[in-house]
Image (spheres, rainbow, N blue to C red):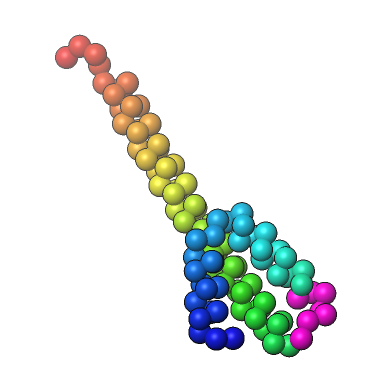
Amino acid sequence: MTSNSSDKSNLEISGITFENALEKLDETVQSLEDGDLPLSEALRLFEEGMKLAKVCSETLATAELKITHIQKSYDEQLQFEQNDLDEPLIQ
């Protein structure tokens, strides 16, 4: 594999959506499990699969952080509103 084809592979993976990466990873795993590949092709697919798995993992981690942040913001807002309700309207 030349450096140029490796760069092309990286470019394709860097802009891939989670769903597309997961689908491509599924296909890669299936091809490897079939076992009808020459060693060089199996190694190339394995490397590609590891990159796809990393993309999926990072995307899920980012989504989890966003969800945690949204929940924390909502909880803080809810707590603030609850404190407003606890204060008397006339002082």
Residue drawn at the location 20% of the way across and 11% of the way down: 90
Q: Nearer the viewer, residue 35 or 60?
A: 35
For this view, does 17 lie left or right of residue 36? left
Residue drawn at the location 25% of the way across and 16% of the way down: 88
For this view, does 90 lie left or right of residue 63? left
Position of residue 41 relative to residue 78, above or below, is: below
| Residue 33 place in picture, x, y as percent | 79, 74
Q: Quadrant of the N terminus?
A: bottom right
Q: Nearer the viewer, residue 73 or 4?
A: 4
Q: Nearer the viewer, residue 77 or 41?
A: 41
Position of residue 84 relative to residue 36, above or below, is: above
For this view, does 12 lie left or right of residue 78? right
| Residue 74 place in picture, x, y as percent | 40, 36
Q: Is residue 50 magenta?
A: no
Q: Which residues are magenta?
A: 32-38
| Residue 2 place in picture, x, y as percent | 55, 86
- Which residue occupies the extreme top position in the image? 90
Residue drawn at the location 40% of the way across and 37% of the way down: 75
